[in-house]
Amino acid sequence: MPKTKKRILDAARTLFNEYGFSQVTIRMIALELDMSSGNLNYHFKKREDILEALYFEMVAVFDQRVEGVGASPITLETVKKDVGESLERMIAYRFFWTDLYYLLRRHPNIKKHFFKAAEARKKGYEF
């Protein structure tokens, strides 16, 4: 991922976590990065594009973790590590969890993927 897009996503995630997704504007993100709104719009056309990029970034990390389930023996230590990493990731993307109902209602692509991924993860954890 290009450096500028990564900076935008990091700044947006920080602002979304602090103020909530619905309270953050493209202009606020641009000001945080000391760039023009037009420059930010070159990389992400709208705030929802940033949201989707952050959602799929978060999902990729969860997917990697789930794929690793069963690769090593299940011990108290591995469960502790897995739970700790899950909590860290949830905190890093807490805006998504605090605004979950709103985001799933307003963003059909995310809603569709979220429920499909949830079913797949249940099967992985049942293993």
Image (cartoon, grey):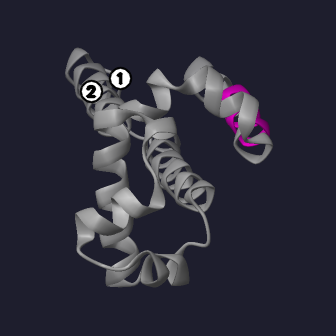
Q: Main secondary structure of the magenta part?
A: helix
Regarding residue 63, the answer to whether it shows in the image is yes
Query: Which residue in the rendered view is the most extreme toward the left?
Result: 77
Image point (73%, 41%), residue name: 107
Tell me the quarter of the picture where residue 53 sits.
bottom right
3D distance between C-alphas at marks 1 and 2: 6 Å
Task: Please say if the residues under marks 1 and 2 sit with CB atoms less than 8 Å apart.
Answer: yes
Residue 120 circle label: none
Q: Secondary structure at mark 1?
A: loop
Name the amino acid type tagged 2.
Thr
Residue 24 % position (x, y): 42, 46
Residue where numbered disc 1 is placed: 74
Residue 63 % position (x, y): 53, 45
**Residue 116 colored magenta?**
yes
Image point (24%, 62%), residue name: 32
Residue 80 % position (x, y): 23, 20
- Bin the neighbour count of mark 1 within 10 Å (Cα to Cα): few under 14, some 14-19, many 20 and up: few
Question: What stretch of residues is rendered in magenta?
Answer: 111-119
Name the amino acid type tagged 1.
Ile
Residue 124 % position (x, y): 61, 29
Q: Secondary structure at mark 2?
A: helix
Residue where numbered disc 2 is placed: 78
In the rendered view, does 127 fall on the left or right side of 120? left
In the rendered view, does 15 fall on the left or right side of 54? left
- Residue 56 vertical position relative to residue 89 in the rendered view, above or below: below
Task: Choose between 43 and 79: the one closer to the eye.
Answer: 43
Q: Which image quarter holds the N terminus?
A: bottom left
